[in-house]
Amino acid sequence: MGMLDELRKDDDSFDFDEDVSLESDEPEVPQRHLFLGMTAVERMFIAVFIFLNVVVLGLAFLLATGRIAF
């Protein structure tokens, strides 16, 4: 008897618990990836608001220092 036959025989002797099921009846729900508790759309709006804030403050600073004039 070869080594693989011995391993196969050892594998057959292993008993699983009857209570434990390897397959679940419920469909697997994909996990939503949340960063800081926000969805991708919420993060996009935050990024756009921060960008607009930087633009407005930068324009105000350029106007205040006289580097740009309308």
Image (spheres, rainbow, N blue to C red):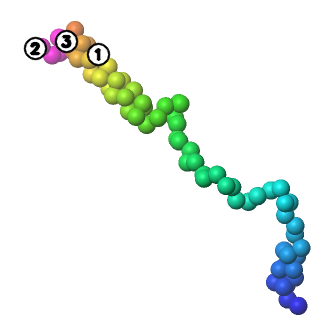
Residue 5 falls within the magenta-colored stretch: no
Does the residue at mark 2 contact the one at mark 3 (Cβ under 8 Å)?
A: yes
The percent coordinates of residue 19 (x first, y second) are 83, 56
- The residue singled out by tag 1 in the image is 57
The percent coordinates of residue 33 (x first, y second) are 52, 41
Judging depth in this view, the residue of 65 and 39 nearest the camera is 39
Is the C terminus in the top left, top right, bottom left or bottom right quadrant? Answer: top left
- Quarter of the image where one finds residue 43: top left
Q: What is the magenta range?
A: 65-70
Main SS class of the magenta portion in the image: loop
Instruction: Please determine whether, in this image, residue 45 is positioned above or below residue 12.
Output: above
- The residue singled out by tag 2 in the image is 70
Mark 3 vs mark 1: which is more N-terminal? 1
How far apart are labels 2 and 3 at the CA level?
9 Å
The percent coordinates of residue 67 (x first, y second) are 17, 15
The residue depicted at 81 percent of the width and 84 percent of the height is 4
Mark 2 vs mark 1: which is more N-terminal? 1
The residue depicted at 70 percent of the width and 59 percent of the height is 23
Does the residue at mark 2 contact the one at mark 1 (Cβ under 8 Å)?
A: no
The residue depicted at 12 percent of the width and 14 percent of the height is 69
